[in-house]
Image (tube, rainbow, N blue to C red):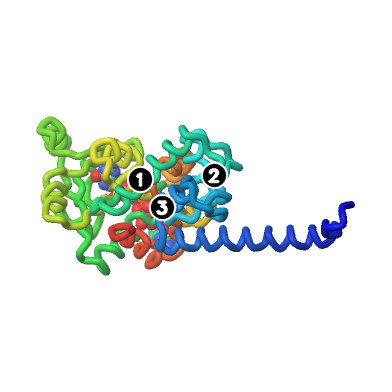
Amino acid sequence: MPAHRNPPEVDRVAAARAAVAARRARAAVKAQVASGERSALEVARAAWSDEDLPAEKSLRVRDLLTSMSGIGPARAEAVMGELRIAPSKRLGGLGTRQRTALADWLAARGRKRGASKLVVLAGPTAVGKGTVSAHIREHFPDVNLSVSATTRKPRPGEVDGVHYYFVDDAEFDRMIRDRELLEWAVVHNSYRYGTPRPPIDRALDAGDKVMLEIDLQGARQVRDAMPEAVLVFLLPPTWEELVRRLIGRGTESAEEQARRLETAKVELAAQDEFDVRIVNSDVGTAAREVVDLFSAP
Ligand SMILES: Nc1ncnc2c1ncn2[C@@H]1O[C@H](COP(=O)(O)OP(=O)(O)OP(=O)(O)O)[C@@H](O)[C@H]1O
Ligand SMILES: Nc1nc2c(ncn2[C@@H]2O[C@H](COP(=O)(O)O)[C@@H](O)[C@H]2O)c(=O)[nH]1
C-alpha cells in the first residue's frame, strides 16, 4: 500500500459519513419541494444544469415525484411508466428524451395546479363524495357546487334546484341535444346524471371557484373537455370501511350493494388516472384538502 493512503477502515468511515451527508442533502431538497419552497421543476432543472449540485443530481425521480403534494408511490410509478423512466433512475442519470418528457410533465402539472378554478371530485360509491361536498357547501361558501340534472326521483329532503335539477327523460334528451351539458352519464346502470354547462362557464368567467361531484365516466369527459380541471379521486381508508359505509347507509338493496361494490373495484383500479388522491378518513380533513387545491401552488 502506498505510504500516503489511509488505512481501509478510515476510508470506510469517510465513505459512510459522505453517504449520510448525501442522504441528508437529498432529504432537504425533498422537504423544500414538499413545503412549496422550490418547485419540482426547479429542482429538476438544477439537476440538469452544469452547477455542482450533487443532492439534486443524485435525487431519484421517484423521490422527487412523491415529494409533490397529491402524489403517492403508486401515482409516481404510473407517471414514470408513462414517461418511460425506469423506477431506479436519478435525475442526473436521465437521457435527453426523458429530461424533456419529465420537464413537460412537471410544467403542465404546475400550470394546472396553479391556475385551475375547477375541481372535480369523483370516487367509488359510498366513499363519501356527497358527505364531503355537503361539508364544503356548509363551510366554504366561496366554492360554487355545481347542481347536476338527473332523471332519478328526489329522495326525502332533496330540493329541486338545490341538490339536483330533477328532470324527466324528455327534458334530459333536450339538454343533450341543445349541448347544455358539459358531461353526462348513466350512473349505476340506472338513471342519467349530467352537469349543466352554462352556470360553470359563468362562474369560471367571473373567476369563481367551481366544484363538480360526479361519477368517474363524467370526470373523464370533463378532463377531455376542460383540461385545466383538477381531478380528485376520493379514497376510502380501507376496502372494508367502504363496504361498511355502503351497507351502513342502508339506501340500497343487498343486490344493488353487491353490484355497486363490483363497480367500485373497477373504479378503484382507475385511481391513477386522477391528478390527486385524497383519503376520506375524516370528513373535515378531506374537505379541507379538496378546498386547498383551489390555491395549490
Ligand atoms: N369520513 C367518513 N367517516 C365515516 N363515515 C363517512 C365518512 N364520509 C362519509 N361517511 C358515511 O358513508 C356513507 C356514504 O357517504 P356518501 O353517501 O356521502 O357517499 P357517496 O360517495 O356520495 O356515495 P354515492 O356515490 O353512492 O352516492 C354515509 O353514510 C356517510 O355518512
Ligand atoms: N357523471 C355524473 N355523475 C353524477 C352527476 N351528479 C351526480 N353524479 C353521481 O351520481 C352518483 C349517484 O348519486 P345519487 O345522488 O343518486 O346518490 C354519485 O356517484 C354522483 O357522484 C353528474 O352531473 N354527472
Residue at mark 3 to residue at mark 1: CA–CA distance = 10 Å
Q: Residue at x 11, y 45 (%)?
A: 198
Classed neighbour count for the residue bearing mark 3: other residues with Cα under 10 Å, few (<14), some (14–19), many (≥20): some
Q: In screen coordinates, is 136 left or right of 270?
A: left
Q: Residue at x 30, y 59 (%)?
A: 133
Residue at mark 2 to residue at mark 1: CA–CA distance = 18 Å
> What residue type is disc 1 on?
Ala
Q: Is residue 276 above or below residue 216?
A: below
Q: Residue at x 51, y 35 (%)?
A: 95
- Which residue, as the protein is rendered here, is positioned at the far top? 177
Residue at mark 2 to residue at mark 3: CA–CA distance = 14 Å
Q: Secondary structure at mark 3?
A: helix
Residue occupied by mark 2:
92
> What residue type is disc 2 on?
Gly
Q: In screen coordinates, is 246 left or right of 139?
A: right
Q: Secondary structure at mark 1?
A: helix
Nearer the camera: disc 3 or disc 1: 3
Q: Nearer the viewer, residue 207 or 14?
A: 14
Q: Compare marks 3 and 1 and give the one earlier in the sequence.
A: 3
Q: Secondary structure at mark 2?
A: helix
Q: Nearer the viewer, residue 150 or 268?
A: 268
Residue occupied by mark 3:
42
Numbered label attached to residue 107:
1
- Residue 227 found in image quarter: top left
- Which residue, as the protein is rendered here, is positioned at the far front? 3
* Residue 200 point in image, percent of width and height: 16, 48
